[in-house]
Image (cartoon, rainbow, N blue to C red):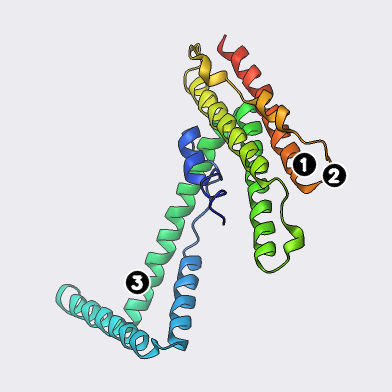
Amino acid sequence: MRNDLQGLEIGQKELQKLTNLPVNDELIILIHPMKRLLSQIIERAKGSEAATVVFLGMTTLVFSYVAFDVIIRVFAHWVTIPSWLLLVISSCSVGILTQIFFYFLWKQRSRTVTQNMTHSLKILLNDVERYNAVIKAIDINDQIEAAGNSGVNLKERNKVIEALKLTRNDLVRALKTEKILRENKKFIVSKLELFADNLATLTAMQVSEQASEHGRLLNEALQIALDVQQEMKSLQSQGS
């Protein structure tokens, strides 16, 4: 991703901080990180680090088994099944219980979002998704251009980036305001800057070439800003 795009995307952690809700939370599936770790080990084993990877892997397995076997012999000498089989059963049991814990935690967090979801927040979250999609589209276009396709370069890129920055500021302000009003239903917002928007600036930047790629991206940013402005008006009426 080019430098001018870095930091523009509104990521999950930032979005959760702005809303004070676990929005867009995904269920942790234990097998997924295990697959990624296994893939990394296999990739390294294919390269020059093969001997090191095999040695560390075998050492870890042997040490884990020996440590488990010693614990069983000292604290659970009455167990009659082989320690290696008990290790397998214990590992599977811990994995299943951990996955169940993650599932109920995810359900609880999802329930929290559902209970606190407002009409304005739903619209703003959709606008954030559209905004991030625009950034992703530009990033993909940049990668295609970097691959040697100079004909797909984005014209007036600076204007598009500036429009995205302005839109980002409006989205952040709207999300902050929605959180304040949601958490303080009787609170009247007194800071006028929370309702300030850059719509006029975005409108002035709109280009005449509606069919061009940079024009389409600018219009998309403008449309998001219009939606945000509408929700800000709605939030103002709620706070009054």
Per the model, the C-alpha gap separating discs 2 and 3 is 62 Å
* Image-quadrant location for residue 160: top right
At label 1, the amino acid type is Gly
Q: Secondary structure at mark 2?
A: loop
Q: Earlier in the sequence, mark 1 or mark 3?
A: 3
Tell me the distance, in whole angstroms, between the alpha carbons under discs 1 and 3: 60 Å
CA distance for labels 2 and 1: 7 Å
Which quadrant is the N terminus positioned in? bottom right
Instruction: State yes or no: discs 2 and 1 in contact (Cβ < 8 Å).
Output: yes
Residue shown at the point (57%, 27%) measured from the top left: 174
Q: Residue at x 46, y 66 (%)?
A: 33
Residue of label 2: 211
Name the residue type under label 3.
Ser
Contact flag, marks 2 and 3 (Cβ < 8 Å): no
**Which residue carries the number 1 mark?**
215
Mark 1 Cα within 10 Å, few/some/many (few <14, many 20+)?
many
Q: Residue at x 52, y 20 (%)?
A: 194
Of residues 107 and 188, the one nearer the viewer is 188
Q: Residues within 10 Å of mark 2 (few under 14, many from 20)?
A: few
Does residue 162 sit above or below 45 in this rendering?
above
Residue designated by label 3: 90
Q: Nearer the viewer, mark 1 or mark 3?
A: 1
Numbered tag placed on residue 43 in the rendering: none
In depth, the one of 230 and 89 nearer the eye is: 230
- Estimate the x, y position of residue 112 in percent, counting from the top left: 50, 36
Of the residues shown, which amino acid type is indicated by label 2?
Ala
- Mark whose residue sits in front, 2 or 3: 2
Q: Residues within 10 Å of mark 3 (few under 14, many from 20)?
A: few
Kindly state the secondary structure of the residue where label 1 is placed.
helix
